[in-house]
Image (cartoon, rainbow, N blue to C red):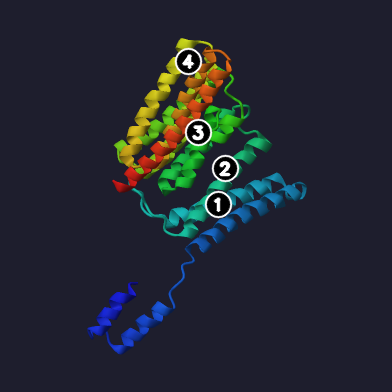
Amino acid sequence: MNFKTFENLREQGLIDDESWNRIEHRHQNPLISIHWELRTLFYLGVTLLTTGLGILVYKNIDTIGHQFILLFIAAVSAGSFTYCFKHKKPFATTRVQSPSTLFDYVLLLGTISLLTFVGYLQFHYNVFGNNYGLATFIPMLGLFYLAYIFDHLGILGMAIVNLALWMGVSVTPKQLLSAGTFNSGATIYTYLSLGILLISGSILSNKFNFKRHFAFSYLHYGVNVAFISLLAGYFYYYSYLGISLLWMLGISVLATYIYIDAYRQKSFYLILLVVLYSYIAVGSLIVRFFIGLGGELGAIMLLLITLIVSAILIINFLIKINRQLKAS
């Protein structure tokens, strides 16, 4: 509320005394938003509920019985989805706003309960046998359906993770780097396929204007996975100069495409990813060149100076790009 505007209207005699008193009282006692407080309480409520149910099941598994636990989890999931389908807005290919904050967390509770139900069935009753691909494929389809029908980015992220599990990989960059799973060409190609698939999902979302706001989620995971797999391919074939340079060429092609698209979208985050991964790639080539010169002290010092200077240039470049994006 622009209080000065009301003061000017008061001076012009356009606001009577009674209305002015109400406006002045409202200005002196403004309303306080509790939006984030409510969201936090709902989030804690879902977290505490699922945690409490897990502890209850763990401590009383022998007396409660597996059938009762499965029935209870199914009832929670069914009840949550019944509420969500009853109160959801009509489906649209564009963004659909959630009816309420409560709706989001009931949907989240139903989704977690559904995954728990399927996981419990497989763990205790082994309903899918040794076909673990089917055990992840079915929940993946369900999550993608729920993400699109309810227009929920959080569930979309869970669906992407299940897609990665179905393919036998992980999409979290930290896990990619720490798990040490880049020990075979087949694994690297699987990661690369996943990255390309997710980037393609982003492209198709934008091209056909079908849930375009989902495009960034696909691109976020896809870019990280694709760059890491390409770098892994370069180092895996490091001893084969020609093949390793082909992987480096793939990095340059991907970096060029993502940079152009990020600049068009004015996404500094994507530009930052491109610059960081490109810096790692170019830095590895520089290190490889200086290693070829031998281990002389002069070559090592020149390498350190090169890396320091390039890091400074990269920082200046990012600052300049950020200013350009804000100004445009």
Q: Which of 314 and 255 is in front in this view?
A: 314
| Mark 2 element type | helix
Report the Cα–Cα distance between label 1 and label 2.
Answer: 10 Å
Tag 4–tag 3 contact (CB < 8 Å) = no
Q: Residue 87 at x, y = what percent?
A: 43, 57
When asked about the image quadrant of residue 325, the answer is: top left
Judged left or right of residue 204, residue 45 is right
Callout 1 amino acid: Leu
| Mark 4 element type | helix
Q: Is residue 139 above or below residue 113?
A: above
Tag 1–tag 4 contact (CB < 8 Å) = no
Could you tell me which residue is drawn at 42 percent across and 79 percent down? 28
Callout 3 amino acid: Leu
Sequence order check, earlier mark of 1 and 2: 1
Classify mark 2: residues with Cα within 10 Å, few (<14), some (14-19) or many (20+): some
Tag 2–tag 4 contact (CB < 8 Å) = no
- Specify the label residue 109 is tagged with: 1
Check disc 2 and report the residue beneath it. 115
Classify mark 1: residues with Cα within 10 Å, few (<14), some (14-19) or many (20+): many
Could you tell me which residue is drawn at 52 percent across and 55 percent down? 105
Q: Residue 276 at x, y = what percent?
A: 46, 33
Sequence order check, earlier mark of 4 and 3: 3
Sequence order check, earlier mark of 3 and 2: 2
Q: Residue 60 at x, y = what percent?
A: 75, 50
Callout 4 amino acid: Ser
Q: Which of 183 and 131 is in front in this view?
A: 183
Report the Cα–Cα distance between label 3 and label 2.
Answer: 14 Å
Sequence order check, earlier mark of 1 and 4: 1
Check disc 4 and report the residue beneath it. 244
Report the Cα–Cα distance between label 2 and label 4.
Answer: 41 Å
Check disc 3 and report the residue beneath it. 163
